[in-house]
Amino acid sequence: MNKIVDNFANEKIQIFNEENFEQVKTMILDKVDYVVLIRNNTPIKIFPVEKGKIAEELCITHFLVGKENMEIDLEKYKGEIYLVMGNNDEIKGVVTFKEIICYLKNALKAIEREFELVKTDLEAFMACSEDLACITDGTGRKVRISSSAERIYGLKPEDFIGKNVAELEKNGVYFPSATKIAIEEKRKVTVIQKTKTGKKLLVTAIPFFDEKNNIKRIVSISKDITDEEKLKAELKETKALLKKYEEELTSLRAVHIKSSELIYRSKQMEKLIELVNRVAPTDSTILIYGETGVGKEVLAKYIHNISRSGNPFIKINCGAIPENLLEAELFGYEKGAFTGARSEGKPGLIEVADKGTLLLDEISELPLSLQVKLLRVLQEKEFIRVGGIKPIKVDVRIIAASNKDLRELVKERKFRQDLYYRLNVVPVTIPPLRERVQDIPILAYHFLNMYNEKYGRSKQLTNEVMEVFMKYPWPGNVRELENVIERIVIISENDQITKKDLPGELLNQEETNHSFGVHVSRLMPLKEATALVEYQLIKQAIEECGSSYKAAEILGVDQSTIIRKLKKYESMFL
C-alpha cells in the first residue's frame, strides 16, 4: 500500500469531478482491479472490483461503507480520497468523496423520478379497473386503495388509508377480512365478503414476503358479485319451480286442453307434430299409420283445425260398414237408386264433408271396387252418386288412416297401387304408447281430470300407480289408458287411487316385469329389438343397483359405456 501512496505523490493524477465522473464508472467496470481508500495519505482499505459488478453498486457498497445518510459535512472528509487502480498497480485517477456524494444524489433524483412514474402507472391501473384493488403493509394497515372503494363500501379511499383491516372488520365495514386471514395463515386466501352497504364481494388476498419470510405487503382484489349471486339465487328458485311444474305437469295443463288438441311430451311426438304443422296448412293428402288406439283420429282432427277449422270434419270406418252399404254411405244415392232407398235420395259423406275434411279410417278395408271411385275423388275432385249420372264437384281434404302397411297390401294385390300413391303423399306414423313412455303421465292426468269432471269425483293417482303405468306395455295404446283411467275413477273407493284399484292385467304384467325386466311386445327389425332389450336391461340394472357405477359392474361393462348407451337409446325410444 505504501508504494501506492508513493506513486500517488510522484504521478500527475487526473482528479475526477461531477462532469467526468462517468469515466471512472467505465474504468471500474472494465479496466480496474480494485479501488483504494486513502485517508491523510494513508491507505485505509482496498475494495476489489468483482468481474461484471456495475459501477453504481460499487459506489454504494464500497465507497460509502459505514455512512448512514447522504447529508454529510463534506469538509470533515477533505482528506479522504479514492484511488482508482489499474491492473499493474498504476493509478488511473482520483475520486473525492464530494464527487461521489454529488453523483449519488443525482442518481437518487433519477430513482425518485422513476418511482413517480411507477406510482402514476399504479394509480392509473387501480383507477381503471372496476374491481377493487387494495395494498396493505405486513400488519394489515392500508397504504393504498382504488377509487372504487366509495362505490362498494360507501367510504372515500382516503377514509381507509392508515386504518387496519381488523379495525374495519370490527366496525362492520365488511366481514370477513381476507387480508386479516392471509396475515394469520401466511398464505393466499379467497373469501366471500359481505359489506355494510349490502354488497357481496369475492375477495382474494395475496401476501408478499421478504427474505426472512416476513410479510411485507398484502395485495387484495375484490370483485363485486352481488348481481351474480342474485342471479344464481333466482336460477336456483326457477329450477325448483320447474321441477315442481314438471312433477305436476299435466294436472296444471290438462284442464285447459280441448278434445281436439294433442297431448304429448316425448321427443318422437314433438318431431311428428313439427312435420304435421308444416303440412297441415296445405291441401296435401295425408296418410296416418299407427296401431289401434294410438290416436289417429285425434291427429286428423288436429290437422283439420289448422287447415279447415269451422267446416265439417267427417269420419268413416271403412271396416265397420258392410261393402254393399259402404258405397252409398260414401257417395250417396239418387232417389229410387235401389230398393229401400229414400224417395228423396241421400247425400254421401264425401258430399257432406265439402269444404271440410274426410277421415277414412282403416282405409286398408276399402273394397277394390270402391277404391276406383275414391281415386276419382282424389284426382278430379268430383264423384257420381249411386244411381246418378251427374258429376258433383267437391272441395274436400282426404286424410286416410291405417294400422296395416299399405305397401304390403299392394304387393298382395289387395290394394290398388295408383290409389296408394295418391294417398301416400305425406305419410306420418304415430308411435305406440310403449315407445313414448314420457307421454304416459301427461295423458293419464288429462284423462283423470276429464273423468273427475264428468263424474263429479276428485280422484288422485299415487306414485305407485304411476310406476305401474310407466312399466306396462299398453297394447291398446292411448285408448286402453283412457279406459283404465275411466274404470278406476268409477270403481275406486277412496280418492287416493292405489295399486289395489288397478285392473288385474296391469298387476300381472308388473309381476312379469319384476321376474324378467325386459320385453319386446311387437315385431320389429332385429337390430332395433336388440337395442330395445339392451336399453331396458340397462334401466332395470340402474333402478335395482341405485347407480350407473354398480349397474356397470353387474353388466360387466365400463360406467362410461352405460352412460353413452343410455343417452343413445333414450333418443331412440323416448
Image (tube, rainbow, N blue to C red):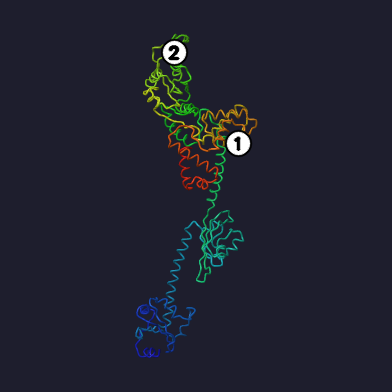
Amino acid type at mark 2: Tyr
Label total for image: 2
| Above or below: residue 328 compared with residue 299 | above
Position of residue 177 in the picture relative to residue 106 (left or right): right
Picture quadrant of residue 115: bottom left
Residue under numbered circle 2:
333
Mark before the other along the chain sequence, 1 or 2: 2
CA–CA distance in space, label 1 to label 2: 55 Å
| Above or below: residue 223 compared with residue 51 | above
Amino acid type at mark 1: Thr
Foreground residue among 54 and 458: 458
Query: Which label sits in the foreground, 1 or 2?
Result: 1
Residue under numbered circle 1:
462
- Label 2 sits on a secondary structure element that is strand
Picture quadrant of residue 507: top right
Place of residue 347 in the rendered image (x, y in percent of width and height, measured from the top left):
45, 15
